[in-house]
Image (spheres, rainbow, N blue to C red):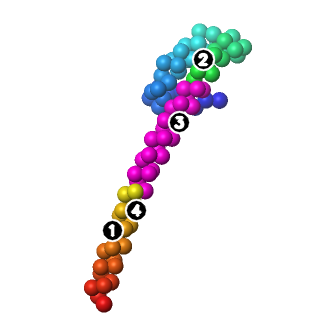
Amino acid sequence: MHPPLTLHRHPMCADIIEQFQKCHADHPISKFFGECTELKVKLDRCFRQEKALKRKANFEESKKFKERLQAYRKEINEKSEDRNQQSV
């Protein structure tokens, strides 16, 4: 099973998606007997590569977010410590 074959959601795999859809349109019955299997395998590989790239980008983004969050927390803690020392 594959995700919905929308071109805007899978720009890396757009060519293969178009070929796969054309194969299904050109071979309405033989698609059930393996006519488009080779394209399906290519499509699956492309989706895996695309997912790996997205996963890596999301991981990098989350690392940056965590760093910013830690810096913000440190800044807040320093400000609260300064306030506590001034009030004593």
Magenta highlight on residue 46: yes
Q: Marks 1 and 3, Cα distance to the nearest angstrom?
A: 35 Å
Q: Marks 3 and 2, Cα distance to the nearest angstrom?
A: 20 Å
Residue 71's spot in the image, x, y percent? 36, 62
Q: Earlier in the sequence, mark 3 or mark 2?
A: 2
For the point 57% across and 17% down, which residue is it?
A: 20
For the point 49% across and 35% down, which residue is it?
A: 53
Position of residue 42 relative to residue 76, above or below, is: above
Q: Earlier in the sequence, mark 4 or mark 2?
A: 2
Magenta highlight on residue 11: no
Residue placed most toward the observer, 25 or 56: 56
Q: Earlier in the sequence, mark 3 or mark 4?
A: 3
Identify the mark at residue 52; answer none if there is no mark: 3
Which residue is denoted by mark 1 in the rendering? 75
Mark 3 near mark 2, Cβ–Cβ under 8 Å? no
Q: Which residues are magenta?
A: 44-66
Residue 57's spot in the image, x, y percent? 45, 41
Position of residue 11 relative to residue 25, above or below, is: below
Mark 1 near mark 4, Cβ–Cβ under 8 Å? no
Identify the mark at residue 70; answer none if there is no mark: 4
